Amino acid sequence: MLVSAKEMLEKAVAGHYAVAQFNINNLEWTKMILLECEELKTPVILGVSQGAAKYMTGYKTVVAMVNEMVDSLGITVPVALHLDHGTYEAAKECIEAGFSSIMFDGSSLPIEENIEKTKELVAICNEKGISLEAEVGGIGGEEDGVVSTGECADPQECKQINDLGVTMLACGIGNIHGKYPANWAGLQLNVLENIKAVTGDTPLVLHGGSGIPDDQIQKAISMGVAKVNVNTELQIKFAEAVRKYIEEGKDLEGKGFDPRKLLAPGCQAIRDEVKDRVNVFGSANKA
């Protein structure tokens, strides 16, 4: 059964570790992440972007697949199904479809509108027992066509959104979606410190977790980040492993072209990377 991310993140704040959000793209992604997290006994948040949901034929399909998979694989660790970077409309749709956690990304809106819409969604989510993530300030890189330059969030705006009663708060601290450029300046930990000072025990979220050096991630976790989003890293590792299989001609041997065999190395690469990230974030055996 899917759960809200509230309890797992409150425990993470208290225990000074972070829960990973691994974005899912298809059946293989979902299966491998769930199996590895069960083995590691870590809670997990499965992130679904609007684009990935469309690719998987819609929010209801995703909910049905994840629910059935949790059941059929005998998953016992807490699993939250989370809309990633949702618009106001998408948030409403996911609440209806049965998601257990929602991110409303109003960071590109004027702060007044972000506050107004977040406030309304807080009320709906509280009533239904769903966790809600809000965002302040731009995060660099590209995410479903939204581009910003790695700017940092204004701590006062973070306080305004936090005070509405959100479950978790995403705020730009110089992080970027996708691959990090060679001249990236690193996380602005002083900004994180200022945000933490005005948001209290609210779990903070680090987007663009793929490509940030582990020591910087661990430092951010020690300062109050309780959720780290990972997507690009798994995609790259999956692609590398499948490429190697084809370049070695294994798809031409016997029934090596069978998609179950063709994708198997990529699937293993996902599991390996999940294990690595969970160890870095410190959430193993916390389920």
Image (spheres, grey):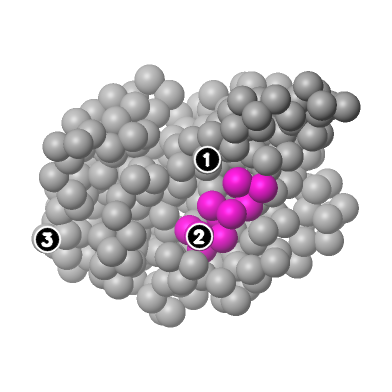
Q: Can residue 191 be seen in this view?
A: yes
Q: Residue 237 carries which label?
A: 1
Q: In this view, does 22 lie to the left or right of 199?
A: right
Name the element at disc 1: helix
Q: Which of 33 and 275 is in front in this view?
A: 275
Q: Can residue 10 be seen in this view?
A: no
Q: Residue 275, percent across and down?
A: 56, 60
Q: Give the range drawn in magenta.
A: 268-278
Disc 1 to disc 2, how far (Cα)?
A: 12 Å
For residue 244, which quarter of the picture? top right
In the rendering, which numbered label is found on residue 190? 3
- Residue 277 painted magenta: yes
- Would you call the spot at circle 2 few (<14 residues within 10 Å), some (14-19), or many (20 or more)? few
Q: Which amino acid does label 3 sit on?
A: Asn
Q: How far apart are marks 3 and 1 (CA)?
A: 32 Å
Question: Three-letter amino acid code at disc 1?
Answer: Lys
Q: Is residue 37 left or right of residue 105?
A: right
Q: Position of residue 279 (x, y in %)?
A: 49, 67
Q: Looking at the picture, how far across and down is residue 115, in whole percent? A: 30, 41
Mark 3, other Cα within 10 Å: few <14 / some 14–19 / many ≥20: few
| Residue type, mark 2 in image | Asp
Q: Is residue 36 above or below residue 257?
A: below
Q: Do the residues labelled 1 and 2 touch (CB within 8 Å)?
A: no
Residue tagged by mark 2? Answer: 276
**Between 35 and 267, the one nearer to me in the picture:** 267
Q: Residues within 10 Å of mark 1 (few under 14, many from 20)?
A: many
Determine if the magenta segment contains residue 212.
no
Identify the image quadrant of the C terminus. Answer: bottom right
Cβ atoms at labels 2 and 3 below 8 Å apart: no
Q: In this view, does 275 lie above or below 28?
A: below
State the separation of the CA atoms marked 2 and 3: 27 Å
Task: Look at 44% across and 48% down and name the residue there.
Answer: 229
